[in-house]
Image (cartoon, helix red, strand yellow):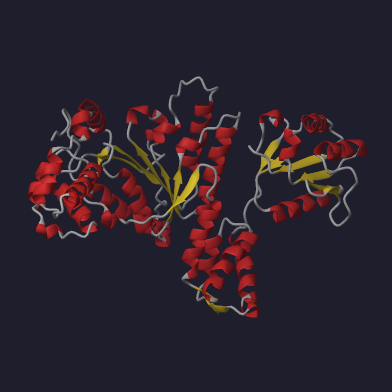
Amino acid sequence: MISSATRDETSLRATAAEAAQLCRLPLWEWTAAEGLRVPGSPAQTNTRTPDQALAFLRDLGRPAVALFLDAQGLVDDPVALRLLKDLAADPAGPTLLLAGLTPAVPAPLAGVTVEWTVPPPDRDEMALVVRRLLAQLPRLGLQLDVSDPRRLVDAVLGLTPREAERVLLQQAVVDGRLDDEDAARAMTARAELLSAGPLDLLDPDVSLADVAGLAALQAWLGQRARGFEPEARAFGLDAPRGVLLTGVPGCGKSLVARAIAGSWGMALACLDVGRLHGSLVGESESRMKEALTAAEAMAPVVLWVDEIEKAFPDASANDGGVSQRVLGLLLRWLQERPDGIFVVATCNDVSALPPELTRRGRFDELFFVDLPDAVEREGILAHHLAARRRDPASFDLTALAGATDGFSGAEIESAITAALYSAYSRGGELDTAVLVDEFSRTVPLSVTRAEDVATLRNWAAGRARPAGGSPPPTGPPVAR
């Protein structure tokens, strides 16, 4: 038996028909709505239920290719499941192609089923789809103003032919025309279609210009951004692969992940590790495969794995080896993933990371994001004040930076919000004095979790590259 995870039933049907023809075997198709039939012929009577269809194939007593398009019902029905296993053990029986299973190979069929994925159209095949659609648009009363069809082809790569046509038509119908600007919107629509399982598509609504400080990290990202240019391949450079960010919570690691996508003009997909693990056997591995396959189809994309340490809570956990298998899948993919996927993994507790993840080759670099220094705090203060329609020049930023010694960026933002509430409730205006008063009543993480921050900094010394302009200090953390 063969299990196929695909959204493209048209291609799956064509592939099954081609395989049956090459083997000179009859082809049967089964759907829950019609039952079992030879394509182009009426359905056989009494074959609508899974057990009836499988019993019919068993009674044929000769080889055939049978495509089941709604195969989950076969696994959920104990009688049908028994017939499936019996047919799989019969060398003279039909070859069964199952589509629509979750997970792709359920535990009851492990060992007798091979997983197979229908590859999406390659660039040449998708170019034919796009050219065919472009030729149809004038006949549909839509205008065409596309200078380079290759941009549209790139925007819909990874989709099925029908999905690609639908996405491009949707862009054309909005304003009655399809032009070069629709390529970016089509790319966003493609990412939304491909986000699956624990993978979410996010709006990269910030850029690296919104990130205060982190000079070393910003300079490094500036170099890596050019690595996606075609000329970089000719120069002998490999495409950038990714970065692992660890450090003090609230200091901008998540902001950097979003800002990279926004600055580089790439889609942003977030792997939610909280939805990665499932209760069924094989479900966690299936979800990881599904998410990584979707990320590949979205390329070019920034794949953000937030708090990656939570994906592998304990390598020695009594979970039947699930964590180890999921880790193995991720490690292999990180090593072999195709170009066009930049992975940004963020981590608060680096001691919980499996050592295999931190070695060279998985990521291009490991950065430590520390608490902001005085200059960086002035930039953070100015940014958040301006975002709240306040002129930073009317505040004593030097005094405010001194009052926020030991604060993270998130704590500064939260305290500014609290000060605004305080000023509004008193009917006054926000000024330096109100902010200093609020900062004096805020106890930052560098005080409440002083030992944890010190541990992070001591680990980073000599192991991680500082994201700011100077190496992370060792010893006691900065306190207010």
At x 52%, y 62%, the residue is: 154
Residue 325 on image: x %, y %: 53, 29
* Of the pair 118 and 348, the residue shown nearer to us: 348
At x 51%, y 42%, the residue is: 198
Q: Is residue 462 visible?
A: no
Q: Is residue 27 left or right of residue 211?
A: right
At x 8%, y 53%, the residue is: 396
Q: Is residue 66 depicted above or below 266 in this figure?
A: above
In the picture, residue 278 is in which quadrant? top right
Q: Quadrant of the N terminus?
A: top right
Q: Quadrant of the C terminus?
A: top left
Q: Is residue 395 left or right of residue 204?
A: left
* Of the pair 284 and 221, the residue shown nearer to us: 284
Q: Is residue 105 visible?
A: yes
Disc tally is 0
Residue 315 on image: x %, y %: 45, 24
Residue 49 on image: x %, y %: 82, 40
Q: Is residue 157 left or right of residue 446?
A: right
Q: Is residue 159 left or right of residue 434?
A: right
Q: Is residue 167 depicted above or below 420 in this figure?
A: below
Residue 17 on image: x %, y %: 79, 52
* Of the pair 243 and 59, the residue shown nearer to us: 59
